[in-house]
């Protein structure tokens, strides 16, 4: 097993080890977490009232008598709601970087993780591991894919960074970096309405990618509601194709313009004049489409 896979596996196994002690909640300090949603806290709090905290929190000492929560903030919040004064913990000596890596790996093990959160989580893990901003990680992945497909000779696939990327994906065991670039990176540029629906778990990511093709906001909103209501992917694809066909259809001319065009004998024009008129008509169609989009916004 490679160094990175062994390292990540060791961190995760450490987190699963039995509790070493109990600590008062007042001594625990939540750390910045990759997780943004903490759902069903009341249900977890009720379970904790009945059975206690079954899985210990993973914490690391801060050196002032307090402990930073590395993994288990949801249990920490629910324990507070349940009225507990202390919780079982496993105290481990981790550097800040190791703690951030473990928190990111633990976040990716969640059962309720949706595709958008998973995408952001994987990029955050790569960013932390490579020591690069997320934007640079995305650029690296895209260059790797272009080289892999023979689109451009990037000379990046054999680099230490590319090998590191491959090792992280192997360690996670979820998907290859190629499928991640193809199916998941497009989720980053989703319109806000689709991103929100995906984060809520209201639609699958395949539906979000289909709906992304529809530029007309009113049409996309209507299709999004149908997707939320359970429209199958096959039906959604058919609706999207129809919407795209409507978007590409030429806009009807205003009556006054249509009347003037009807009086013109375009066929009788010399070729050079006909070419100029055709070009101007295309420009006019573009302006009309732009005006329509402004009025419909």
Image (cartoon, helix red, strand yellow):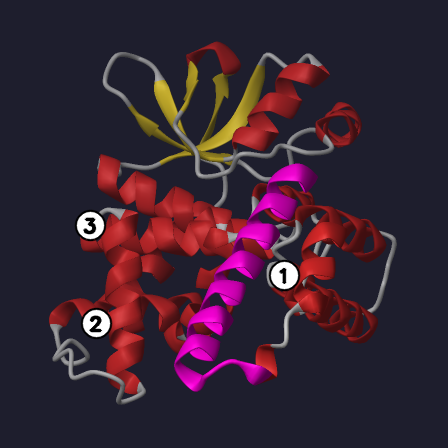
Q: Nearer the viewer, residue 276 or 158?
A: 276
Indicate the secondary structure of the residue bearing disc 2: helix
Q: Nearer the viewer, residue 106 or 21?
A: 106
Identify the mark nearer the N-term, 1 or 2.
Answer: 2
Indicate whether residue 44 is drawn in magenta.
Answer: no
Residue at screen point 53% across, 49% down:
117
Q: Which residue is mark 1?
A: 205
Q: Is 122 displayed left or right of 132 in the figure?
A: right
Give the Cα separation between the discs numbered 1 and 3.
26 Å
Identify the mark nearer the N-term, 1 or 3.
Answer: 3
Q: Which residues are magenta?
A: 268-297
* Residue that sits furthest to the bottom in the current view: 150
Q: Which residue is mark 3?
A: 132
Asked if the residue under mark 2 is in contact with the one under mark 3, i.e. CB atoms within 8 Å, the reply is no
Which quadrant is the N terminus positioned in? bottom left
Indicate the secondary structure of the residue bearing disc 3: loop
* Of labels 1 and 3, the one closer to you: 1
Q: Is 226 displayed left or right of 125 in the figure?
A: right
Q: Nearer the viewer, residue 87 or 29?
A: 29
Give the Cα separation between the discs numbered 3 and 2.
13 Å
Q: Which mark is residue 64?
A: none
Identify the mark nearer the N-term, 3 or 2.
Answer: 3
Asked if residue 270 shows in the view, the reply is: yes
> How far from the left and from the top, in percent, is residue 211?
66, 60
Q: Which residue is mark 2?
A: 162
Residue at screen point 71% across, 17% down:
82
* Of labels 1 and 2, the one closer to you: 1
Q: Is 269 displayed left or right of 256 in the figure?
A: left
């Amino acid at each position: 097993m490679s160094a990175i896979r062994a390292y990540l596996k060791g961190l995760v196994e450490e987190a699963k080890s039995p509790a070493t002690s109990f600590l008062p909640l007042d001594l625990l300090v939540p750390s910045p977490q990759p997780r943004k949603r903490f759902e069903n806290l009341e249900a977890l709090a009720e379970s904790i009232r009945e059975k206690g905290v079954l899985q210990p929190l993973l914490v690391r000492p801060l050196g002032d008598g307090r402990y930073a929560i590395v993994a288990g903030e949801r249990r920490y919040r629910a324990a507070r709601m349940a009225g507990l004064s202390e919780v079982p913990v496993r105290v481990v000596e981790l550097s800040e970087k190791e703690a951030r890596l473990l928190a990111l790996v633990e976040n990716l093990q969640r059962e309720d993780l949706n595709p958008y959160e998973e995408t952001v989580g994987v990029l955050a893990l790569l960013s932390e591991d490579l020591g690069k901003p997320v934007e640079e990680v995305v650029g690296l992945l895209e260059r790797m894919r272009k080289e892999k497909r023979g689109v451009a000779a990037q000379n990046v696939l054999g680099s230490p960074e590319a090998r590191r990327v491959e090792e992280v994906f192997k360690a996670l065991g979820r998907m290859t970096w190629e499928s991640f670039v193809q199916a998941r990176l497009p989720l980053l540029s989703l319109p806000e309405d689709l991103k929100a629906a995906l984060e809520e778990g209201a639609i699958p990511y395949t539906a979000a990618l289909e709906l992304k093709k529809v530029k007309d906001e009113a049409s996309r909103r209507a299709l999004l509601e149908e997707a939320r209501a359970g429209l199958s992917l096959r039906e959604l694809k058919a609706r999207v194709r129809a919407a795209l066909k409507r978007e590409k259809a030429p806009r009807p001319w205003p009556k006054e313009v249509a009347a003037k065009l009807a009086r013109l004998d375009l066929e009788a024009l010399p070729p050079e004049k006909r070419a100029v008129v055709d070009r101007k008509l295309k420009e006019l169609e573009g302006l009309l489409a732009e005006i329509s989009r402004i009025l419909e916004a």
